[in-house]
Amino acid sequence: MRGPYVAVIGAGRATGEQERVAEQVGALLAEAGAVVLSGGLGGVMRASCRGAHERGGLTVGLLPGGDRSEGNQFLTVALPTGMGELRNGLIARTADGLIAVGGGWGTLSEIGFAMRLGRPLVAVGSWAVTAPDGGPTYPVMGSPDEAVAWLLREIAHPTAH
Amino acid sequence: MRGPYVAVIGAGRATGEQERVAEQVGALLAEAGAVVLSGGLGGVMRASCRGAHERGGLTVGLLPGGDRSEGNQFLTVALPTGMGELRNGLIARTADGLIAVGGGWGTLSEIGFAMRLGRPLVAVGSWAVTAPDGGPTYPVMGSPDEAVAWLLREIAHPTAH
Amino acid sequence: MRGPYVAVIGAGRATGEQERVAEQVGALLAEAGAVVLSGGLGGVMRASCRGAHERGGLTVGLLPGGDRSEGNQFLTVALPTGMGELRNGLIARTADGLIAVGGGWGTLSEIGFAMRLGRPLVAVGSWAVTAPDGGPTYPVMGSPDEAVAWLLREIAHPTAH
Amino acid sequence: MRGPYVAVIGAGRATGEQERVAEQVGALLAEAGAVVLSGGLGGVMRASCRGAHERGGLTVGLLPGGDRSEGNQFLTVALPTGMGELRNGLIARTADGLIAVGGGWGTLSEIGFAMRLGRPLVAVGSWAVTAPDGGPTYPVMGSPDEAVAWLLREIAHPTAH
C-alpha cells in the first residue's frame, strides 16, 4: 500500500532558503512513502520534487497550463490541466494533507481551499492569517522535520476540531 | 452598457453586522449599475443580493452544488456549477473586482485567487493576512461606502502595481 | 418566478440556415420565459442570444476564455470562465434542458455531458450518434417550434427513462 | 524518458468482451512505455489498469468523486477530483491520445472533448457518430493491436488534418 498524498505548496519563484526547506520536505515525505503532489512548476514545487525524486519517491504535478513540458524534470506524472489557477483547488482537494513553504497569492488560495475542506495543513515560513472571528488557524513550524512529522501524524490520526 | 461585475464574498453564516454591511454594499453596487456576483447561498451572499435586488440590480450566483433551488431568492441568475468549492476560483475569475465581508476559509481562497489574478479587492471586517515576504496586500476599509467607492474607482482606473 | 434555463448549443461558425434556426429557438424560448444559456460566442450561440434578446429574454454566456469582451453583444450576463472547453460541461450542468443546432466536436461533448446527467436534449440538424449497445439516444426534430415545444414539455413533465 | 500519456475511455459497466479488449489495450500500452490514464473506476477503466499494471505500467486515475478509495486497485496514482463528470474533460486534456472501448454518454463527452482539442483518438466497438456537415471523424478499429499501433504512431508522427 502506498502512503498518503501530500501536497507541497509554494511559489514558483522562491528564495534559496525556501528551496532548501522544500527539498528537505520532499525527501522526508518520500522516505515515509508519501506521494508528493504539487503544481509541478519551479521554485518550491521543483525543489520538493527533487527531494522526493532523489529518495525514489513518486511525484505528481498538476500544471496550470496545457503543455506537459512545462512540468519540472523531477515529476513522475505531469498533468497539464489547462485550468489555470483553478488547478490550485484541485491540488488541495486531491491531497490528504499539505505543507506550505513560503508562497504567493496562489499559495494563499490553496491554503484557503485546504482548510475549507478540512485537510490538515502546516506552514513553514508561509502566510500568516487572522480570521475575522479570530478563530483557530493552522500550525506554523520552524523546520521541515517538525512539519512533516506533525502532518503525517495528523493524517494518520486526525485531531478532533 | 452594463457596469462592472463585482463579487461580494463572505460566509454563508454571518453576523448581523456583516449582513448589514453586505446588504449596503449590494445596494450601492446596484445603484452604480454593477452586476453583483456571489456564491449564491445565504449569509453575506444573500444579504448582498437582497441589497442589490431592492435597487433593481442584477445578481448572479455561482452555486457550489448541482441544485438550482439552493440559490437564495434574490438571484436574477442562479447557476449550479456542481464544482464544490472549486467554484470559488470561478467567482474570482469572472469578477472585475471583489469586496470581502467577514468570511471563512472559502472566502480566504477567493481572496487568494483574486489577488493572484490581479483583480482589485477590498476587505471590510474580513481576513487580515501577512505575506511571507511582507509584501503589500489589499486595502481594509471601515464602511461599505468607502469600500464600494474605492473598488469602482480602481476598476475604472487601475492603480499601477 | 423565472422559467427554466435552456442551453442552445452549436458551433461558433454556423451556416445561415443554422443561424436562422438558432435565432428562432432563442425567440421561442424567450417568449416562454426561459433563460437562454450558451457558450456566449458567435454563430449559433450569438444567433440564439439575438433571438432571445429581441423578445426581451435573459441570456447568459459561459465563455471559454478569460476576457468578457469576447462575449457576443446580446448577452445579458457574460461570464469568462477561463476553463477553455471544460466550460462545455458547465453549460450542460447548469441547464435544465438543451437544444443542439448543428455543431462541431465541442457540441458533441456537450451532448455527451447533458445525456450523462439525464438532461432532456433535442437536436435540430445536429450530430447523429449510435451507442455501442444500440441503446436509445435523443430525439431529432425538423423545426424550432417542435424542438422548443418538446423540450419545455419534457422539462416540466419528464418522461420516465 | 517516459512514453506518451494515453487515456483508455469506456464505461464503468462493461461487457466481458469490452473488458478483454481494454485489458489487452492496457497491456500493450504498458509494454510501449505509455502512462495509462483513465477515469479510475471499474469496467473498462479497471480492465485497462489491470492490463497495464500486470506489465509493470504506470496508471493514473482521475476520479469523479472526492474519495480516493473509489479508485480501482490497479491505479499507481488515484486523484479524487470532486469535479463529477467535468473530470471527463480533464482526462481528454491531459492525454496525448485516447482509445475508446465501448462506453456510455460520459465516454461520448470525452470523445467530443478529445476531438475538439485535436487529440488523436481511435475507437474499438464504441460510439459511431455522424457530424452535421458530414465531416471526417475518428478511425474505428477491430482489435487492440491495431488500435494501439495506430494511436502510438499518430502521437509520434501526427497526420496533417
Image (cartoon, coloured by chain):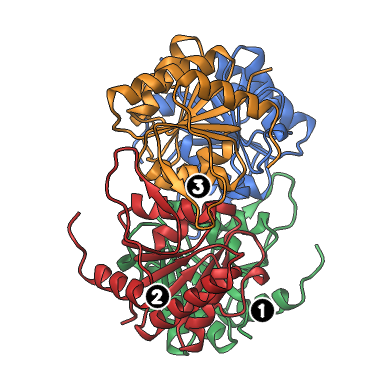
Chain colours: A blue, B green, C red, D orange
The vertical placement of B78 against D99, above or below, is below
Q: Nearer the viewer, mark 3 or mark 2?
A: 2
Residue D83 visible in the snapshot: no
Task: Give how far across and how far down residue D86 sits, in percent.
Answer: 45, 48
Q: Residue at x 56, y 82 (%)?
A: B29
Classify mark 3: residues with Cα within 10 Å, few (<14), some (14-19) or many (20+). Answer: many
Q: Mark 1 sits on what residue?
A: B152
- Which numbered tag is attached to residue C144? 2
Task: Give how far across and how far down residue A138 sits, in percent.
Answer: 51, 41
Q: Secondary structure at mark 1?
A: helix
Q: Secondary structure at mark 2?
A: helix
Contact flag, marks 1 and 3 (Cβ < 8 Å)? no
Q: Secondary structure at mark 3?
A: helix
Q: Mark 3 sits on what residue?
A: D112
Task: Give how far across and how far down residue A20 sits, in percent.
Answer: 73, 25
Q: Nearer the viewer, mark 1 or mark 3?
A: 3
Task: Judge by depth and name the residue closer to the eye, C125 or A17.
Answer: C125
Amino acid of disc 1: Leu
Query: Residue pushed farthest top?
Result: D55
- Which numbered tag is attached to residue D144? none
- Mark 1 belongs to chain: B
Amino acid of disc 3: Gly
Classify mark 2: residues with Cα within 10 Å, few (<14), some (14-19) or many (20+). Answer: many
